[in-house]
Image: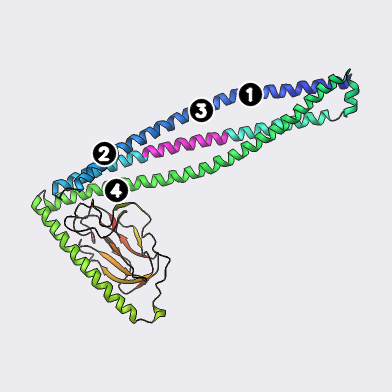
Amino acid sequence: MKKNIKICLFLLLFLALIFNGEIGAKGETEQNNKEVKFLNNEIDSKKEKIEEIKERREEYSQKIRNLQSEQASLKNQLSILDNRLAQIELDIEDTKAKINKINLEIRKVNFEIKTKKKEIEKEKNHISDILNLMYKQNQADTLEVLLMNDSLSEFLNKLKYLEDVNQEMEDSVKDLKKYKKKLEENKVSLKEKNEELVSLKEDLEAKKKEFENQKETKSYILEKTKNSESQYQSLLVQAKKEREQISQEIVGLEKKVRKKMEELSPEKVDLNSDGLIWPISNRSITAYFHDPEYPFRYLFEHPAIDISTGQGTSVRSAASGYVARVKFSPGDSSYGYIMVIHGDGLATVYGHISKPLVSEEEYVTQGQPVALSGGMPGTPGAGYLTTGPHLHF
């Protein structure tokens, strides 16, 4: 009789364990769902703002493209700069919105991690309780339990409860594994989002600097031209003349240096490389080779790509080679550049440099810093009518 009561108590405890767990879980789940819903709504709101900024930014891009297709004039150039300033302001607003969105996503992931840790702990306790009950029940063997019951059907009913206990244990173990897997996924996601956040903050600082650079470019043009169209056109003529001289110089130098390299013994000429590497860390291209939207195309073609980068950024040699030319005058703003001759008929030019780091006829290895970038109007090495800091590559 005592053992029969013991089994009944075990079954009641097991049912109470499941029932109380379900009530507690339901209340906690509802609270968690409210928090996740709130965060999702906030994230969606930021996404909508980012899309709205994207549309407004495209309007400015179209205006700039239209202005670039027109013949260059002072009014035209100032309008381009004004639209670029407005576009960069939107870029700053966009980056701030993305930072806010990422912060919300990080908050959501942290909340999910906290929730999963609670669920794991709760499931561990749940499994522990079931194991304790099973241990107590196993003190009576099957024959004893059978003899305690008045009928076989009563015994089978209790046996069914024991099967339910085993199933509950199996389900709990599965849940525990599922929570642990989700926890690891959340931790990976959190790491990625934190890295993205750091990148966005760096991007924000770069955009703020670009905004200030564009303001300085506009001020420089106004100061240089005294708001006079004739003086602006005179600058264009000077810029054209400068570009033509540089193009002729580059072609002549390459032939001269290659001839000299052929005279050297093979062991002194090591130009093997695995192709070209990117010369700076930033990969944002603002103008392409022979770009149809280049604002001064009616004067000369754009024989390079322009890569957006801040003043004074380290510029690396795209491949190993010999420095054919270092053109730079610290005291004036005439166009400064470095030319490197490579194997396989390749040569690279790095324009608008603000400071050279190598000398002519020096051998450089792939990735070696050769100069600091420039392009800020009026600064050494910038050249005529530069549109702001960048690398002409």
> x and y percent of residue 370 in the render?
34, 65
Please name the residue shown 56% across and 41% down the image: 185
Mark 1 to mark 2 CA distance (whole Å): 54 Å
Foreground: disc 1 or disc 2: 2
Q: Is residue 268 above or below residue 11?
A: below
- Residue 121 is situated, as x and y percent measured from the top left of the image, at 65, 34
- Is disc 3 placed on a helix, strand or loop? helix
According to the picture, the residue beneath numbered tag 1 turns out to be 24
Q: Sequence-wise, which precedes: disc 3 or disc 2? A: 3
The residue type indicated by label 4 comes to Glu
Give the x, y percent position of residue 198: 43, 46
Neighbourhood count class around disc 1 (C-alpha, 10 Å): few under 14, some 14–19, many 20 upward: few
Residue type at mark 1 is Gly
Report the disc number at residue 210. 4
The verdict on residue 227 being magenta is no
Whole-Å distance between the Cαs marked 4 and 1? 55 Å
Marks 3 and 1, how far apart in space?
A: 17 Å
The residue carrying mark 3 is 35
Disc 3 or 4, which lies upstream in sequence? 3
Mark 2, residue position: 59
Q: Residues within 10 Å of mark 2 (few under 14, many from 20)?
A: few
Tell me the element at label 4: helix
